[in-house]
Image (tube, rainbow, N blue to C red):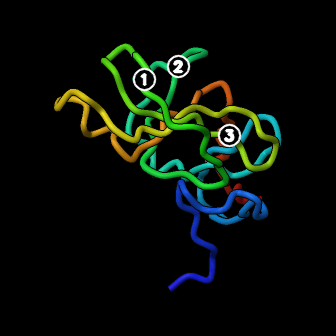
Amino acid sequence: MSNQPSITPTSDTSSKVITTFLDHPTFSCANCAATIALQDELISKAFSGRDGRGYLIHSAVNLKMGKREDRALLTGVHTVADVYCMGCNDRMGWYYHKASDNSQKYKEGKYLLEREKLVKENKWKLDG
């Protein structure tokens, strides 16, 4: 069992930014460099966000949840909540609470993160 604090969408978001996933490729906030997700959690790059391309991500950390709302998206109406970086409060994308169409249910409980808001941190080690 890990000693890392657990972050869920309804957790108190006044806590400190988690710095974890050492030596693992991650996505970080482009504004403040807070770790947002492991690259291994990427499901698809073929999504559209509010400001361009988006990534569907299985799970994320260091995000706080905005207000839940029904939103008309390209694939129908979904119940979503915008998510914000805990480090700088920048809007990073949204969390899918519920999809009305059965063909879209696979998105429930996942994150759509805006590609332009993320930096890909590869953690490569070069032999020198």
Q: Do the residues labelled 1 and 3 touch (CB within 8 Å)?
A: no
Residue sitting farthest toward the bottom: 1
Q: Residues within 10 Å of mark 2 (few under 14, many from 20)?
A: some
Indicate which disc, 2 or 1, sits on the residue closer to the N terminus.
Answer: 1
Q: Would you call the spot at circle 1 few (<14 residues within 10 Å), some (14-19), or many (20 or more)?
A: some
Left or right, 68 with respect to 26, comes to: left
Q: SS of the residue at dot 2?
A: strand
Residue occupying the point 50% across, 37% down:
68
Q: Name the residue under label 1.
A: 47
Q: Which of marks 1 and 3 is nearer the N terminus?
A: 1
Look at the numbered discs 2 and 1 and tell me whether their residues touch, using CB distance below 8 Å.
Answer: yes
Marks 3 and 2, Cα distance to the nearest angstrom? Answer: 17 Å
| 10 Å crowding of disc 3: few (<14), some (14-19), many (20+) | some
Q: In this view, does 6 lie to the left or right of 74?
A: right
Q: Which of 101 and 52 lies nearest the eye of the viewer?
A: 101
Q: Look at mark 2 in the image and give the residue it sits on.
A: 53
Image coordinates of residue 5 in percent, x first then y, are 63, 73
